[in-house]
Image (spheres, rainbow, N blue to C red):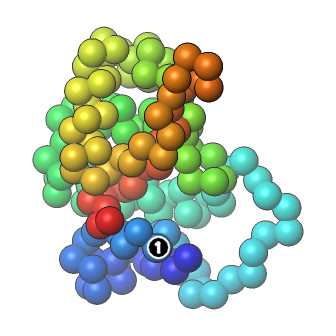
Amino acid sequence: MRRLTLKEVNERHGGALPPDAVFRPDDEEPARPAPAAKSKRRPRSERFAALNAFVDFGIADADLTPAEALVWFVLFRDTKGTGTARTAQADIARRAGLSVRGVKLALRNLRAKGMVQVVRRGQLTTGPSVYRVHPTRHMG
């Protein structure tokens, strides 16, 4: 997995994060050893880099509605160290102050814009869907 700065993503990939890459802070060294123990969340610097990319480029470039931005924020907040968020649509609706129907529409639009990817669709027996959240339009 490549680790790119926001500047590298903008210059080399036109502002869209490639599928084989993750964000890294501008001040971080390009290669860094893997952490000894797995944590539930990505390091704070990576999370802030992704959040900054979303605020600086994702919202305007993808022309997000307020509902889409709220749904993205809730999913981003629930993202674990694996890079995925396992959250029920009803829970997203409650936390974002939206209807379940509004969440479904926002998720459909975010998927179409390449900012959310459904990794596993939820079912009654397996629990909520699993999403991968991208801070900018995602190629792939």
Q: Residue at x 55, y 47 (%)?
A: 84
Q: Residue at x 49, y 18 (%)?
A: 91
Does the image show residue 56?
A: no
Does the image show residue 17?
A: yes
Image position of 86 with respect to 132: above or below: above
Q: Residue at x 22, y 46 (%)?
A: 112
Q: In the depicted view, which residue is nearer to us: 134 or 66?
A: 134
Q: Within 10 angstroms of label 1, few (less than 14), some, or many (20 or more) residues?
A: few
Q: Residue at x 58, y 80 (%)?
A: 28
Residue extending farthest right: 36
Q: If the image is split into quadrants, where does the C terminus sit?
A: bottom left
Q: Secondary structure at mark 1?
A: strand
Residue 24 x, y percent position in the rendering? 52, 72
Residue 88 x, y percent position in the rendering? 50, 23
Residue 133 x, y percent position in the rendering? 43, 49
Q: If the image is split into quadrants, where does the N terminus sit?
A: bottom right
Image position of 106 with respect to 48: above or below: above
Quarter of the image holding residue 13? bottom left
Left or right for 17, reference 121: left
Left or right for 14, reference 134: left
Q: In the depicted view, which residue is nearer to us: 120 or 135?
A: 120
Quarter of the image holding residue 35? bottom right
Amino acid type of the residue that numbered disc 1 sits on in the rendered structure: Ala
Left or right for 112, reference 7: left
What residue is pinned by disc 1? 21
Residue 16 x, y percent position in the rendering? 28, 69
Q: In the depicted view, which residue is nearer to us: 82 or 59?
A: 82
Image position of 113 with respect to 64: above or below: below
